[in-house]
Amino acid sequence: MNKHVLALAAAAVLLASCGKKEEPAPAPAPAPAPVAAAPAAPPPEEKVLNIYNWPDYVPEGMIAAFEKETGIKVNYDTFETNEALNAKLVAGNTGYDIVVPGTAFSPAQTEAGLFQPLDKAKLPNYKNLDPAIMGALVKADPDNKHLVPWAWGFTTVGINKTKVEKALKGMAMPENAWDLVFKPEYTAKLKSCGIAYLDSPTEIIPVALHYVGKDAYSNSAEDYKVATDMLAKVRKDIRIFSSTMIDDIAGGKACVAIGWSGDINIAAGRAKENKSKDVIEALLPSTGALAFFDTMAITKDAKHPGNAHAFIDYYLRAESGALVSNEMSYPTGNKAAMEKINPETAGNKTIFVDADYAAKLIQPGKFTNESREAMATAYNAFKAGK
Ligand code: N2P
């Protein structure tokens, strides 16, 4: 691709110089041609950058360090679901320069022109990105024009092993960890110590589809019905719906959760810090877990695209990528960061899964807008217990 771009650039230079040669040289020394005034340079951007990201996703101190180095003041807001971000993006005029959509929505958002193409000349650290991850992102963003990875991970089952074993009262752990959150025999017991689900249609319906043996990214209303019929049977046992469940898990309010791999690992670390004796684990369900890729994109109407590029390039430094994995327990899409990741994190098979399990991760698919609406209706009915 680089070669291709270079070849194109070379061809353009060649054409330009050919063109010059063909111009007839005027006989008399020409008066300086009235050069059209160069378009006025855009006024320099104010030193502000507005970022909209998921909660608990940025290493401590990273934003302050960027502000100190660049003098750019960052306003950092958070959203809890892809649905919430999408509603803002579709309405337009978000006021945000950088947003961090996940793969359940980013293909449609990219296609709808909600992001501006990245100017890779302003991103010298783009070279640090892992070609394998960029290859996977092509599904969401053909030619990798708009999106760069923030982090990736998978939606799975997290447990407080200590509390779950107690609540199961001698009943063996299931072979497939999804049973803990979807099978009434288990949920009936685990409700006593707290079952938590992520709170979003595009988080829960796909894992439910997977559990009932359907394509997790099915666009079929009949499949949604099968999934919600299954969900209805466990509804009464689900106590918490939340996309910020780290403290619920770490603090013992939830003993089993459908959550994101990194957040569950953060909860495990936090419980240890708090000197809890309970063991918290992200599980690797035997049938697979659902991979997601969260990416940075610059909104089409961003007021500070220059600052946005400066931040993206800062984030693409190897050091930044390593901090994200070390502190937030999510794999980075930054290949150059890998050697800077501490051995405990790099060796944690529920953060960086091994090749066998990687093959089981269900890769993101595409939902149509109609499907997402149908999913939202199905999810809301499930949540309302209807
Ligand atoms: C939030 C992590 C978001 C991961 N802590 C799912 N997009």
Image (cartoon, rainbow, N blue to C red):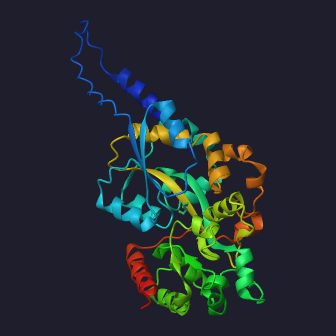
- Is residue 378 at all visible to an observer of this figure? yes
What is the x, y in percent for residue 17?
Answer: 42, 24
- Quadrant into which the N terminus falls: top right
Residue at position x 55%, y 91% in the image: 230
Q: Quadrant of residue 189?
A: bottom right
Lateral position of residue 238 relative to residue 173, left or right: left
Front one among 376 and 148? 376
Q: How many marks?
A: 0
What percent of the width, then of the height, locates residue 186? 66, 89
Residue at the far top in the pictured view = 29
Residue 54 falls left or right of residue 153? left
Please name whichever residue, 26 or 88, is drawn nearer the observer in this view of the structure: 88
Ligand 1 image position (quadrant): bottom right
- Who is closer to the viewer here, 297 or 229? 229
Judging depth in this view, the residue of 20 and 238 nearest the camera is 238
State the image coordinates of residue 371 (x, y, percent, origin top left): 42, 78
Identify the residue at horizontal 29%, vertical 61% (top origin): 91
Q: Is residue 12 above or below residue 130?
A: above
Residue 281, image x, y percentages: 71, 69
Quadrant of the rendering where the C terminus is positioned: bottom left
Location of residue 84 with respect to 182 vertically, above or below: above
